[in-house]
């Protein structure tokens, strides 16, 4: 990947090459009964009982999509990195879950099967170059009254620091960090403000303390810090 390629291309390159390691870590977490129970509670509480169709944006290896499909919802997942999607499809197949995974950009996504009752996204907004356009487009994919449920965290409060040999240093360089609105945000309020500015209503955030405690016991991924994650829910009031 050339140094002067656009920011999103470098980020997509990073996630494609990181897919095997990401899969190993997330697969461990999915197989852990305490994490599985905690994430099942997060998504069950986040989604209204009548939300039948759910779109998982930036699905990666499918962590949220798999957990939500296991709750009996009809799920579609979209991600920009084909290598992540290969794992997601295999994960669904091995669990006997019928989930459609498609490649696409979270900013201006083109997805069949909408409008959806709910749109979920875990650990994506921090790495998007155009959060505001994405959020406005997500409203178009949701039915009026549909639910947005985002899980994210101020992972890099105080600034991103990677050693030169860390592949993240190339993808998330100074130019990228300037382009990413939330990558170095230090408070989850920044997520709430952008969700409100995109026209969502009833924006509420909940700290996921149970997961924070589990991470204290079991540790986090290599080169990551334990960080309190938040669930942010909101409602699409109608057509944008
Ligand atoms: C930290 S991973 C999170 C994956 C998954 N949501 C999870 O919870 O495990 C970030 C994901 O966002 C994807 N991604 C990054 N930029 C994207 C974009 N513009 N559109 C769609 N997916 C994107 C990456 O390919 C990667 O799979």
Image (cartoon, rainbow, N blue to C red):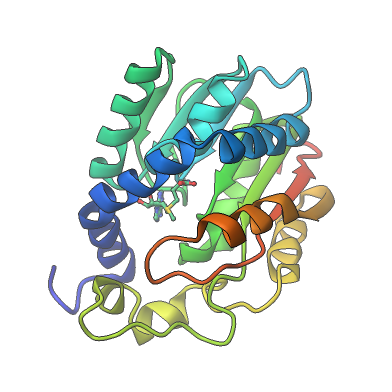
| Residue drawn at point x = 64 percent, y = 32 percent | 40
**In this picture, is 34 found above or below 231?**
above
Left or right placement of residue 170 versus residue 147 in this view: left
Horizontally, is 133 left or right of 91 in the view? right
Residue at the far left: name it: 2
For image coordinates 68% across by 43% down, the residue present is 149
| Residue 111 at x, y percent in the picture | 45, 31
In front of the other: 238 or 86: 86
> Could you say which quadrant of the image residue 28 lies in?
top left
Q: In this view, does 182 lie to the left or right of 162?
A: right
In this view, 198 is above or below 140: below
Residue depicted at 37% across the width and 66% down the height: 222
User: Count of labels shown?
Assistant: 0
* Front residue of 149 and 196: 149
x and y percentages locating residue 104 in the rendered image: 36, 41
> What is the quadrant of the N terminus in the image?
bottom left
Q: Which of the 4 quarters of the picture holds residue 60? A: top left
Q: Position of residue 231 (x, y in %)?
A: 71, 50
Position of the C terminus by quadrant:
top right
Q: Residue 125: image x %, image y %?
A: 54, 59
Residue 114 visible to an observer of this rendering: no
In the rendered image, the residue lying farthest to the front is 217
């Amino acid at each position: 990947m050339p140094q002067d390629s656009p920011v999103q291309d470098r980020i997509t390159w990073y996630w494609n090459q990181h897919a095997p390691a990401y899969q190993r870590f997330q697969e461990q977490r999915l197989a852990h009964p305490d994490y599985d129970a905690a994430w099942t509670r997060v998504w069950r509480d986040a989604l209204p009982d009548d939300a039948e169709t759910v779109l998982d944006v930036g699905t990666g290896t499918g962590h949220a999509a798999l957990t939500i499909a296991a709750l009996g919802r009809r799920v579609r997942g979209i991600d920009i990195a084909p290598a992540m999607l290969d794992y997601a499809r295999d994960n669904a197949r091995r669990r006997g879950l019928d989930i459609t995974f498609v490649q696409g950009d979270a900013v201006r996504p083109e997805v069949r099967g909408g409008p959806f009752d709910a749109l979920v996204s875990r650990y994506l907004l921090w790495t998007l170059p155009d959060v505001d356009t994405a959020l406005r487009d997500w409203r178009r994919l949701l039915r009026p009254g549909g639910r947005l449920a985002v899980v994210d965290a101020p992972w890099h409060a105080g600034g991103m620091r990677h050693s030169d040999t860390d592949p993240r240093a190339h993808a998330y360089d100074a130019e990228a960090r300037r382009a990413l609105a939330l990558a170095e945000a230090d408070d989850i309020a920044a997520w709430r403000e952008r969700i409100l500015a995109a026209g969502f209503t009833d924006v509420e955030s909940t700290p996921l303390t149970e997961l924070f405690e589990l991470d204290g016991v079991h540790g986090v991924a290599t080169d990551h810090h334990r960080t309190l994650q938040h669930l942010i829910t909101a409602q699409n009031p109608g057509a944008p």
